[in-house]
């Protein structure tokens, strides 16, 4: 990226993170932790700490993007080689496709809620017809939301930046409006803020806190790799570092706190509705905009068809905007670059985006996010275990082995010093991933039992992956000095 086109300011980077963090998966994080036994402040503490931890590799990997104007797949060539870089790029891309599918499913459900408000029979369209386990109405709105994502990303990175800039404040305003309404209706913040922790000793809390912290790190471990895709547009290091530090941890905690209060106040309004259902904003919007009163109430939550229509429009617009913002920035830009890196002469950025969209459908995201246990320990924990070693190698190579010095033209030469595959990087990646594989297979139900040491390692999956892979890479490169040239 030439210097003349590096024009992203502090606000652009802050807005990027604010818009990405204002998403439904963030909204449900605290609920999943509280379902595991935490009280509200323990859940928010875990979310805050996890995002402070993941901010470190994000800023470390962001530095190269701003300094040299290069994307994540190009940066990966310095450590993995021009051909070997396809391995971490594809790992990141496939994870992003899964995330793309999950967020597209969430956005599609929001659209379905809106349609059912005005067309109740839409919920029963097709009778019992289901496509790969997804009812026909959900399948139709899933594909409609999918098309929205693809339309925006095909217009290019300038369109992405413009969308993120105005989506960020609007989504926050809509969330605060919902917060104000539900607290007023409940005459307070509700019962969940008084809900005690189920842990009576520090040891009990620690056994749940550590895997939860790993899951929180796994939530943005994808962006900790491909953040150069965005920081290569930055005016300077100060802008990208300050913008990201202001945008990520603060927004994650604030939006999670808003979700806690909204859910708590909703529980006061609807005391017989299961709490896990109230953590689902699409479900809550459906209750608010329904013409018939929920069984908990003698009257509808919102009186008047016109008012219900307006609330439905505003609420669904917030969900759609939030989901579009995170999906495009976090889950399309990077894999599109990664797939293009496979065959630059044949796969453009736009073709890479289409490949991402297709794989997002094939991932069947409605099954990935089926329950909190699988979502936290299986999906998020697995992401952390897979991508942590890649982050460790990238950081070790750029900061320790090469001391931030890169020969950028050589990263693009098929016969240069980075040609082929670096066996040290591939070996370090395997050493970082393999110890966590047995624990992942147990958490996802593929295996029923493994030696306890592997279950313990998986609890610290991201940390062990970063440490093992990073250390192995540095030692391996020092043993092969010819393999670690600097500019």
Image (cartoon, rainbow, N blue to C red):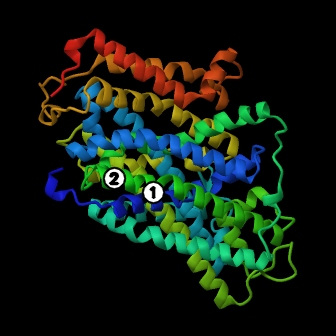
What is the number of the mark on residue 246?
A: 1
Residue beneath the point at 42% across and 38% down: 57
Q: In the depicted view, which residue is nearer to us: 304 or 377?
A: 377
Q: Is residue 256 above or below residue 214?
A: below
Task: Determine which quarter of the picture holds residue 82.
Answer: top left
Left/right placement of residue 318 relative to residue 11 reads right
Q: Which type of secondary structure does the marked residue at label 1 adopt?
A: helix
Residue 395 x %, y %: 36, 31
Q: Is residue 102 above or below residue 437?
A: below
Q: Is residue 94 above or below residue 425?
A: below
Residue 102 seen by the camera:
yes
Residue 283 x %, y %: 69, 66
Q: Residues within 10 Å of mark 2 (few under 14, many from 20)?
A: many
In the rendered image, the quadrant that contains the C terminus is top left
What is the number of the mark on residue 240?
A: 2
Residue beneath the point at 27% across and 44% down: 65
Q: Which type of secondary structure does the marked residue at label 2 adopt?
A: helix
The answer to the question of whether label 1 and label 2 lie on touching residues, with beta carbons closer than 8 A, is: no
Left/right placement of residue 382 relative to residue 297 reads left
């Amino acid at each position: 990226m030439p210097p003349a086109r590096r024009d992203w300011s502090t606000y652009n980077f802050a807005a990027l993170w604010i818009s990405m963090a204002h998403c439904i998966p963030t909204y449900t994080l605290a609920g999943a932790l509280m379902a595991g036994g935490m009280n509200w402040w323990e859940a928010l503490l875990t979310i805050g700490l996890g995002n402070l931890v993941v901010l470190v590799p994000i800023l470390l990997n962001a530095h190269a993007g701003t300094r040299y104007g290069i994307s994540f797949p190009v940066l990966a060539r310095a450590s993995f080689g021009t051909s070997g870089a396809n391995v971490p790029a594809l790992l990141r891309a496939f994870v992003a496709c899964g995330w793309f599918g999950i967020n597209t499913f969430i956005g599609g459900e929001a659209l379905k809620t809106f349609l059912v408000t005005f067309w109740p029979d839409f919920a029963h369209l097709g009778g019992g017809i289901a496509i790969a386990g997804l009812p026909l109405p959900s399948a139709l709105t899933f594909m409609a939301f999918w098309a929205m994502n693809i339309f925006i990303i095909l217009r290019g990175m300038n369109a992405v930046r413009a969308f993120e800039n105005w989506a960020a404040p609007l989504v926050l305003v809509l969330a605060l409006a919902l917060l104000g309404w539900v607290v007023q209706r409940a005459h307070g913040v509700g019962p969940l803020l008084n809900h005690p922790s189920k842990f009576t000793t520090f040891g009990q809390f620690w056994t749940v806190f550590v895997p939860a912290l790993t899951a929180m790190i796994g939530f943005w471990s994808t962006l900790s790799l491909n953040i150069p895709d965005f920081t290569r547009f930055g005016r300077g290091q100060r802008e990208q570092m300050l913008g990201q530090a202001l945008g990520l941890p603060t927004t994650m905690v604030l939006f999670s706190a808003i979700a806690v209060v909204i859910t708590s106040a909703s529980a006061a309004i609807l005391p017989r509705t299961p709490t896990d259902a109230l953590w689902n904003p699409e479900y809550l919007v459906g209750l608010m905009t329904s013409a018939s009163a929920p069984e908990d109430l003698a009257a509808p939550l919102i009186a008047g068809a016109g008012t219900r229509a307006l609330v439905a429009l505003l609420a669904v617009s917030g969900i759609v905007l939030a989901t579009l913002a995170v999906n495009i920035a976090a889950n399309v830009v990077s894999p599109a670059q990664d797939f293009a890196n496979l065959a630059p002469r044949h796969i453009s950025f736009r073709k890479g985006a289409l490949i991402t969209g297709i794989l997002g459908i094939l991932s069947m995201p409605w099954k990935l996010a089926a329950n909190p246990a699988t979502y936290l320990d299986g999906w998020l924990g697995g992401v952390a275990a897979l991508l942590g070693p890649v982050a460790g190698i990238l950081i070790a190579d750029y900061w320790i082995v090469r001391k931030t010095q890169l020969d950028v033209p050589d990263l693009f030469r098929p016969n240069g010093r980075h040609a082929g595959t670096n066996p040290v990087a591939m070996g370090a990646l395997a050493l970082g991933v393999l110890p966590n594989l047995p624990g992942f297979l147990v958490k996802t139900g593929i295996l029923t039992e493994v030696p306890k040491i592997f279950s313990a390692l998986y609890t610290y999956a991201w940390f062990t992956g970063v440490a093992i892979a990073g250390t192995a890479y540095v030692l391996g490169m020092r043993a092969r000095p010819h393999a670690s040239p600097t500019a």
